[in-house]
Image (cartoon, helix red, strand yellow):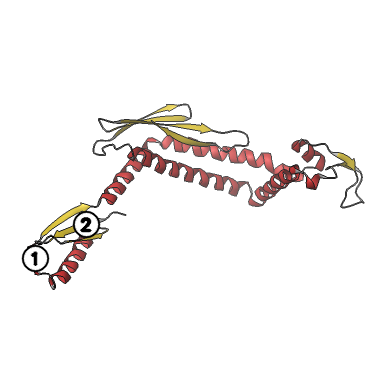
Amino acid sequence: MKKFRFQLITANGNKMFTEAENEEKAWTSFKRKRDAWNESYSSVNRGTITNLGLTEESQMQENGSLLIAQLKEQTKSLRVQYIAKVKNWAKEEFERVTPMRKWSEEQWCKWLGIKAEKRASRFDHTQPVAWRFPKNFFNMYEHKLYGSANGKAASMLATGLEKYVAQAEKGAEDHYENSIIKLAIRIMKKGMSFDNLKMTTTHLGVNIETIISDGEKVVKAWTIIAEGPIQRPHYRYLVK
C-alpha cells in the first residue's frame, strides 16, 4: 500500500510526522496532530512543514508494481505457453494414473519391480489361486509406494478430469505470478534506475530471454523450463 508522509521540524529542532495511504489523509492527520502539539509547544507555528511525498518504502512498492507490470507485458507468451503445457500434462497424467486403480496385484508387482507369488488370497479364501503380492508385502518398502500411488489414483478419480485440470491450471497461474514477483525482487536488488527502464524479449523455443536496461546497467533474465512424463512442467528464472 502507498504511504504519503508530512514532516514538521520545529524551531527548537523537534520533529513530528504523519503517514497515510493518500496525500489528503496524510495532510488531515498531520494538521490534527499539529494542532494538538500547538497547545503545548508554541514553537510549532514557527517550524518548517515539509511534504515528503511517498515514503521510501512506498516508493519501492510503487517501483516494484511498475516493474511487475512491465515484466508481465514482456512475458505474455510465456504465460500462455506454460499454462497450456501444464493443462496438457494434467490430462495425460490423469489418463496415465487413474487406470492404476483397477490394476491386479500382478500388475502392481510388475510396476513395483517385485516378484509376484501364485497363491490364494490371504483375505478371501474363496477367490481362486492367482498371482498376488508376496506374503511379506505389507512389511516391504514397496508397500508404501503402492499405497501412495493407489491413493493418488483414487483421489484423481474422485476429483474428475475437468476439476483436476482446472486445479493444475490454477497452480500454473500461481507459479507464473510468484515467479514474476521473485524476478522483480531480484532485479530491484541490482540497484537500477526506474526512470528510464526499457525491456526487450526474445524467444528461445519455449523459453524466453529478457534484457532489462536503465541506460547504464543491464540485467539479463531467462527461463529454464523442465518437464517429463511424471514431472509437472515448471520453470525458473536465471538472472545475470
Which corner quadrant of the image does residue 6 belong to?
bottom left
Quadrant location of the C terminus in the rendered image: top left
Residue at the farthest left position: 46
User: Which sits in the foreground, 163 or 138?
Assistant: 138
| Label 1–label 2 contact, CB within 8 A | no
> Which secondary structure lies at badge 2?
strand
Q: Amino acid at mark 1?
A: Asn
Counting from the top left corner in percent of width and height, residue 178 is at 44, 44
Q: In the rendered image, which residue does mark 1 sit on?
A: 45
Q: Residue at x 46, y 37 (%)?
A: 80
Residue at the farthest top position: 204
Quadrant location of the N terminus in the rendered image: bottom left
Q: In the rendered image, which residue does mark 2 sit on?
A: 5
Q: Is residue 18 left or right of residue 123?
A: left
User: Which sits in the foreground, 65 or 219?
Assistant: 219
Is residue 207 placed above or below 158 in the rendered structure? above
Q: Is residue 84 left or right of residue 21?
A: right
